[in-house]
Image: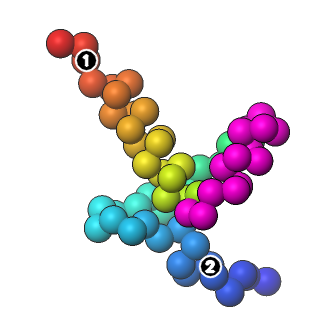
Amino acid sequence: MSRPDYLTRFRSMREEPLADKPIAVLLPKDVDAYVRSLPNKAEWLRSVITEAAQKDRTPDL
């Protein structure tokens, strides 16, 4: 049984293509509560993870 929002729940507000499969992680309870309280948690998570990944893979100048 699929959810009715299956085709839209992982869409980004951006134009960039998204991966074929989502990544899932378990968070500490207090962080989980905060993230779940956000109005657009998927977009927020996508932005934070993208920013961290870009910073992490960019060599220090």
Q: Residue furthest top?
A: 61
Q: Mark 2 points at which residue?
A: 6
Percent of width and height locating residue 16: 30, 62
* Magenta stretch bounds: 27-40
Q: Give residue 41's position: percent from left, percent from top.
A: 59, 58
Question: Which residue lies at the image location 40% right of the left edge and 61% below the top edge?
Answer: 18
C-alpha distance separating marks 2 and 1: 38 Å
Is residue 59 left or right of 52 when viewed as pictured?
Answer: left
Q: Up-down: is 20 above or below 57?
A: below
- Residue count near mark 1 (Cα–Cα under 10 Å), binned few <14, some 14–19, many ≥20: few
In this rendering, would 57 be left or right of 48?
left
Asked if 4 appears above or below 45 in the picture, the reply is below
In the image, 28 versus 58, the foreground residue is 28
Residue 6, image quadrant = bottom right
Residue 30 sits in which quadrant? top right
Q: Is mark 1 on a helix, strand or loop?
A: loop
> In the rendered view of the protein, which quadrant contains the C terminus?
top left
Q: How crowded is mark 2: few (under 14 residues within 10 Å), some or many (20 or more)?
A: few
Kind of residue sitting beneath label 2: Tyr
* Residue 48 magenta-highlighted: no
- Against 14, is 57 above or below? above
Q: Position of residue 3 (x, y in %)?
A: 72, 81
Is residue 58 rendered to the left or right of residue 20?
Answer: left
Which residue lies at the image location 59% right of the left edge and 50% below the top edge?
23
> Which amino acid type is marked by label 1?
Pro
Q: Does the magenta stretch include residue 38?
A: yes
Q: Residue drawn 33% across and 34% down?
A: 54
- In the rendered image, the quadrant that contains the N terminus is bottom right
As drawn, the label of residue 59 is: 1
Q: What residue appears at the point 38 percent right and 24 percent down from the top-left corner?
A: 56
On the image, the x and y values in percent for residue 35 come to 66, 49
